[in-house]
Image (cartoon, rainbow, N blue to C red):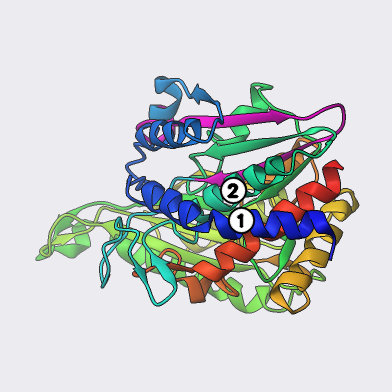
Amino acid sequence: MNDDYARLDAWIDAHFDEEVRFLQELVRVPTDTPPGNNAPHAERTAELLQGFGFAAEKHPVPAAEVKAYGLESITNLIVRRKYGEGRTIALNAHGDVVPPGEGWTRDPYGGEIVDGRIYGRATAVSKGDFASFTFAVRALESLGAQLKGGVELHFTYDEEFGGEMGPGWLLKNKLTKPDLMIAAGFSYEVVTAHNGCLQMEVTVHGKMAHAAIPDTGVDALQGAVKILNALYAQNAEYRKVTSKVAGIKHPYLNVGRIEGGTNTNVVPGKVVFKLDRRMIPEENPVEVEAAIRKVIADAAAQSPGISVEIRRMLLANSLKPNAGNQPLVQAIQKHGEALFGQPIPAMGTPLYTDVRLYGEAGIPGVIYGAGPRTVLESHAKRADERLELEDLRKATKVVARTLLDLLS
C-alpha cells in the first residue's frame, strides 16, 4: 500500500474519537425542516470548524427570500482550502432534516452510541458527511504534501425543500464554481445519476352544503377521488417504462398529503392534495408535467361543478450520467474496494439530491460518503436513524485518499 495512504488511514484512526464527538455535537443542534430554522446549526458548525483552524465563510440567505420559500432561516457555509494551482473539488453535505416523528427508542438529538452505531436524526443523512468530509480534509493536510488545486467544504441547509436556497443559491450568486464535487451519500456505492422529482399541489373546489340536503352542494371530495384514481392508475403505465441506468427502475407517483372539508355534517367544498412524481433520467420534465395536468383536467371534467387549481411546488431535474465525473468514480471505486473489501458499483438512485444543481451548472459530481448499503438500513426519515461507525471511519479514508489522488 502507498505510504501516503497508510499515513492518511493512521491519522483518521488516531482522530476517530474526535470525529465521532464532532458528529455528536452536530446532531445535538436540531435542524427540523419544517420549520427550517437552520442558521443556529450553521453558527455552531462554524464554531466547531474554527477549532480545527478552518475558517467558514457564512453566507446568510436574505430573510425575505427564506420566508417566501417557506422556511425560517438559512446560513450556508463555505470553507476554502487552497493548496496551489489546479482544480478545486467541492464536498457538499446538507444539514437540514425532516422532523424526527414518532417511534424513537433513542433521543433523536442525543448522538447516543450503542453497539457500534451512532443514533440520531441526520447521523446518516447527512450530518455524518459533515464529519467524514471535514476529517478527510484534515487528514489530507496532515501529510504536509505538495498538492495542486484546492478543496471546498459546502455545508448547506436546503436539501429537504429542493436545494434552491442551499447549493442553488451559492451557485446562482457565483460564490463558488468548483471543477468537481462529491456530495453526501452511501459507503457501498458511488452514485452517478438520480431521479428527478415533480411535486404539485392540487386544490379541488366544489360547493359546501348541509349534509341533510347534499344536492344543494357539489362534493369536492368525490371529485378529488376521481382525480386520485386517475392519477394512481398512471402507475401501472409507468411500470412499463424502464430506465437504462442501473439502480433506477421506472417512474412512479405518490400522493403524500390530503386535507379538506370543514365538518362531518358538511358536504366538503374544498379538498387539497399534494403529489410527488419521480422522473427517471430519460424523461422530459416538461412533458411529464403536461401529462399530469391533462390527467387531472380530464378526470375533473367527469364531475360537473368541480374546478381545479394546480400549483407546481418543486421541479428537481434528474442527474444524468456524465463522463466528466470519471476521475472521481475511478478513485472512489479503487479505494472503496480496498477499504471495504468489496467492489463499489457506480449506479443510479431513485432519490433526488442537490447534486443535480451542480450538474446543471456544468460541474461533474458524484454521491459518496458515510452511509449504509440502503436507505432502509439507515432508518433515514424514520425513527431511530443510525450510522455504523465503521462505515464513517472507512468512508472518511476513501474520501481522503480520493482527494490525495486528484490533487497530487
Amino acid found under the numbered disc labelled 2: Phe
Residue 401 at x, y = what percent?
Answer: 76, 55
Q: Can residue 88 be found in the magenta stretch? A: yes
Amino acid found under the numbered disc labelled 1: Ile
* Sequence-first disc among 2 and 1: 1
Pick the quarter of the image with the N terminus.
bottom right
Q: Which residue is drawn at 75% across and 79% down?
A: 342
Classify 374 as above or below 183: below
Secondary structure at badge 2 equals helix
168 and 243: which is toward the camera: 168
Residue 366: quadrant of the picture: bottom right
Residue 371 visible, this orientation: no
Q: Which residue is drawn at 49% across and 30% down?
A: 50
Disc number at residue 12? 1
Residue 193 at x, y = what percent?
Answer: 74, 59
Q: Residue at x 58, y 53 (%)?
A: 132
Drawn side of residue 52 relative to residue 142, left or right: left
Residue 82 at x, y = what percent?
Answer: 74, 28
Secondary structure at badge 1 equals helix
Disc number at residue 135? 2
Pick the quarter of the image with the C terminus.
top right
Q: What stretch is highlighted in magenta?
A: 68-94
Residue 141 at x, y = what percent?
Answer: 70, 40
- Mark 2 neighbour density, 10 Å: few (under 14) some (14–19) many (20 or more): many
Separation of disc 2 and disc 1 at Cα?
7 Å
Q: Residue at x 68, y 59 (%)?
A: 9
- Tags 2 and 1 in contact by the CB under 8 Å rule? yes
- Mark 1 neighbour density, 10 Å: few (under 14) some (14–19) many (20 or more): many
